[in-house]
Image (cartoon, helix red, strand yellow):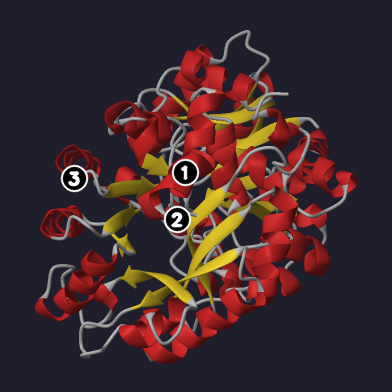
Amino acid sequence: MELKDHVFLSKELKDTFVVDVHIHVGGSTRYQKPRNDGDSVVYTMDRLGIDVTCASCSPGAYCDWMWGNEVCAEAHAGHPDRIKAYAVVNPNYEFDLDEYFVRDDRFFGLKAIPFVQGNLPIDCAGMQQYYAYADKHGLPVLFHAWQPSEVRDATAVARRYPNARFIFGHSGFTAVEEAVEACKLCDNVLLDTTISDIYDGALERIVSKVGADRVAYGTDLTAFECSHILGRVLLSRLTDTEKEKVLGLNAKEFLKL
Amino acid sequence: MRFIDARCQLGRRCVIRENEPVTKAEILELMDRCRIERAVAYHAIAKEGDVKAGNMELLKDTEGDSRFLRQWVALPHTFGEFMSVEELLKGMKENSVSSIRMFPKTHGYSLKPYALGKFMDAMAEHKIPVFMTYNELASEDALYAMLTDYPKVNFIISDVSYREERKLFPILEHCPNFHIGTGNYVVHGGVKTMCEYFGAERMIFDTGLPTGSAAAAVSLICFAEISEEEKTLIASGNLERMLSEVEL
């Protein structure tokens, strides 16, 4: 059975290790965001055969980030082997990350999205404390890296903090040239597949430019579905070996799962 | 499961992205790969350049090709610019065109009865479904007004994003002639929710090819937590029924 057949048979991926490096828990004031708690996430994971997801609390990025991190930690606590928790960081505050990574072991990485926290750039002064901490401890950092300028800033950060590991969310579809340059310059960068709507052929395009080792499955679940992005990978023109790398093997190695 | 795509565009577009399908052969390759049997198709020139010329190009591009179900783009008949309603219906019958697509925002006209009343009366009388994307409507209130102004016309509104449920669910509740194209309706568990609240009859499978993703659209339905009967209705049954009811 080829990987694509799972779509047509509506069968979960039992024999393939699947990691979603980019999901969210928590609701939203801006739009209806159903089934957003940890139990609902795991229900969807089981239906599709996703082994591990890496979550941040999306409303927490827009409001009280420490409250949001508790929401995310709760989802992780309910399913510690299935949901890994990114701590959202906020450049407007000074914060000792030992709180999350030494006195508390609920988090495994950071989520950085400073543009929603006062329209601040990724490489702003307030974020350096967090990048330095990630660098010191070899933590993964998930960037919202949509705009070309964000990807250029993220690349500068990745070069400055080589011991941290950075996932450039969205960028392989939205800022292709800059994402390719980031992969050329930085070994500590992985791209993801997260985007709600993109044409068939876009995944093949980015894989052809950076290699199948540099792209990981990500979806933005529960902000929206994940099955259609799974299908974009499964029904793409990538080989099954390449699909397996994108779906889970790259993330397993990069995130040390 | 048989998939029939309710939203496909043929023809050379002005703007394309790297590795994006353009030719009919590339679209057919994707349809084959994603096991889509047929597609309702309109022409890019009818959207981007000249409606009447684009509709004629569609006839040429689909001549003798059973994979595509012809769809014409329509304009209001304003002082001779476009075919009269009678000419439109005659042309549709002669050329096996079974549905209409409209671009009110892009093409710059009103959906109100003073501008479109006669046209929509004909769509209702001949049971011709009318397709448009959500971004062609000014707002959810404009959608509601259109659906209630023309309650006997079946509308298929596509490219509905994951952020619209608060706006659209009350309209679905009140307007039975409102159907959603599933292509970009990627709410977490959204297809299941729609089936539970409004029934599978309100959803029509579409892809938005070649700028939308057939792979994503097919997977969204295949992996949805609904019955096989509901999947069949969404994938092809609802559209086939609607098109079979057209009287020309």
**Mark 3 = which residue?**
A186
Mark drawn on residue B75: 1
Quarter of the image for residue B191 reads: bottom right
Which residue: 41% across, 35% down?
A203
Residue A228 locus on image (x, y percent) = 59, 46
Question: Does A88 sit above or below residue B210?
Answer: below
Mark drawn on residue B136: 2
| The one of A81 and B188 positioned closer to us in this rendering | A81
Marked residue chain, label 3: A
Label 1, label 2: how far apart the Cα atoms are: 13 Å
Report the amino acid beneath label 2: Glu
- Say whether residue A13 is visible: yes
Which residue: 33% across, 34% down?
A206
| The one of B166 and A85 positioned closer to us in this rendering | A85
Which residue: 54% across, 58% down?
B160
- Is residue A128 rendered to the left or right of residue A66? left
Label 2, label 3: how far apart the Cα atoms are: 42 Å
Work out whether disc 1 and disc 2 sit on a shared chain: yes
Residue B43 locus on image (x, y percent) = 46, 28
Residue A254 locus on image (x, y percent) = 39, 49
Label 3, label 1: how far apart the Cα atoms are: 53 Å
Report the amino acid beneath label 1: Leu
